[in-house]
Amino acid sequence: MTEVLLELEGLDAFYGTAQALEGVSFSMGQEAVSVIGRNGMGKTTLCNSLLGVEPPNARGSARFRGKELLGLPSYKIAGQGIAYVPQGRRLFESLTTDEHLRMIRTSRPGKWTPSAVYELFPRLAERKKVGATQLSGGEQQMLAIGRALLTNPDLLIMDEPSEGLAPTIVEQVIGTCKALVEDGMAILLVEQNLGVATEVAERQLVMIAGRIAAETSSTALAGDPDLQRRYLGVEPLAQAH
């Protein structure tokens, strides 16, 4: 593995007395890694704990380039070089597409500017003056990804980016993720869509009941129907298509 970017050790998270994460431990470098699991398994809680968004009571350790993230406010975590594409996009109803992209300010140098985002997603360039919540689901996801890229991150965390999207748009999201990884960006992809998870990342972390129950590869997971049923409770990929 390349130099460690993100390292979690014994990460626990609680909402009141209810434990949502239990002893989550893994590390990743400059690569794509998928956390795959059904709804309610703790995947979004993992994102919230790492990003300081609606944070649960978390303990343990989550380090980015050796610096502890737990306890930091979200803006300081973003300043370390981590960006977040949240589940549901979370766009501002009162802002246009262009206003979403123009409001981002970062001190981190890099190639991502509003113009670069429009080059990546030409459809957004055609919809600059449209209110963000009036965009289609696919366009909203493009905007959420573009907004995150404008911070010029080293690590992009994406929570269920395929949710609610048409299959053709899902393919575009997969293609975008692959292109970003090829360009040198690390991606932590949190998904319940097995097809998306295995297309984007070779490393697969299976989350069950708030724990990393197994680590496997996309090749092994995609080719083993019994494994898919056992860990994810889904029908095999071949049948899903």
Image (tube, grey):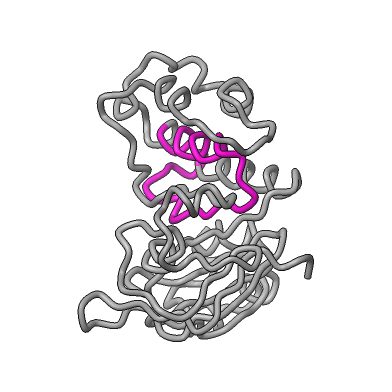
Which stretch did the figure color magenta?
A: 140-169
Q: Position of residue 126 (x, y in %)?
A: 49, 15
Q: Tell me, yes or no, if residue 238 can be seen here.
A: no
Q: Position of residue 152 (x, y in %)?
A: 61, 39
Q: Position of residue 40 (x, y in %)?
A: 32, 72
Residue found at x 26% / y 29%:
93
Residue found at x 47% / y 77%:
207
Q: Is residue 56 left or right of residue 70?
A: left
Residue found at x 52% / y 64%:
194
Q: Residue furthest left?
A: 16
Residue found at x 51% / y 85%:
213
Q: Is residue 185 above or below residue 192?
A: above
- Of 141 and 96, the residue lying toward us: 96
- If the image is split into quadrants, where does the N terminus sit? bottom right
| Quarter where residue 173 is shown | top right
Q: Is residue 112 above or below residue 231?
A: above
Q: Residue furthest right?
A: 2
| Quarter where residue 113 is shown | top right
Q: Is residue 38 left or right of residue 206?
A: left
Q: Position of residue 43 (x, y in %)?
A: 41, 68
Residue 150 colored magenta? yes
